[in-house]
Amino acid sequence: MKWLPQKAQDTKMLAKLTSKNQITLPKAVISRIDATEYFDVAVENNRIVLTPVRVQTTKAVREKLEQLGITEQDVEDAVAWARR
């Protein structure tokens, strides 16, 4: 989250829940966070908490697996083990 003075962080706004369970977040709220399309959704103390998440592309996942030295065969073996 971008740094904001405490008063700006505490500003409260309304968002309406539609009949299709959709919520449009106020532009003033979205402009305060890094660009994202997805949010982790949780309920904490009877509040809905949205946390921006970055979804990794397949390419990024493959690159990370390569960095860790995990091969395609390792993944296949792990899946076969988990399905037993």
Image (spheres, rainbow, N blue to C red):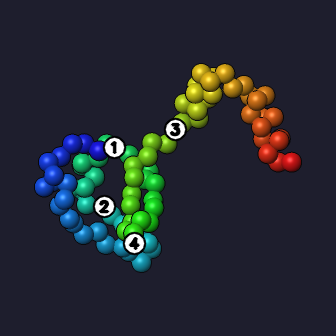
Say if 33 sits above or below 65 in the image. Answer: below
Left/right of residue 47 with respect to residue 13 in the rendered view: right
Residues at discs 4 and 1 in contact (Cβ within 8 Å): no
Mark 2 lies on residue = 25
Left/right of residue 31 with respect to residue 36 in the rendered view: left
Residue type, numbered disc 3: Gln
Q: CA distance from mark 2 to mark 4?
A: 19 Å
Mark 1 lies on residue = 35
Q: Quadrant of residue 62?
A: top right
Residue type, numbered disc 2: Leu
Q: CA distance from mark 2 to mark 3?
A: 23 Å
Which residue sits at x=45%, y=59%?
A: 41
Compare marks 1 and 2 and give the one earlier in the sequence. Answer: 2
Which residue sits at x=39%, y=52%?
A: 51
Compare marks 4 and 1 and give the one earlier in the sequence. Answer: 1
Which residue sits at x=44%, y=51%?
A: 38
Mark 4 lies on residue = 46
Say if 54 sits above or below 62 in the image. Answer: below
* Dot 1: element: loop
Say if 11 sits above or below 32 in the image. Answer: below
Compare marks 4 and 3 and give the one earlier in the sequence. Answer: 4
* Dot 2: element: loop
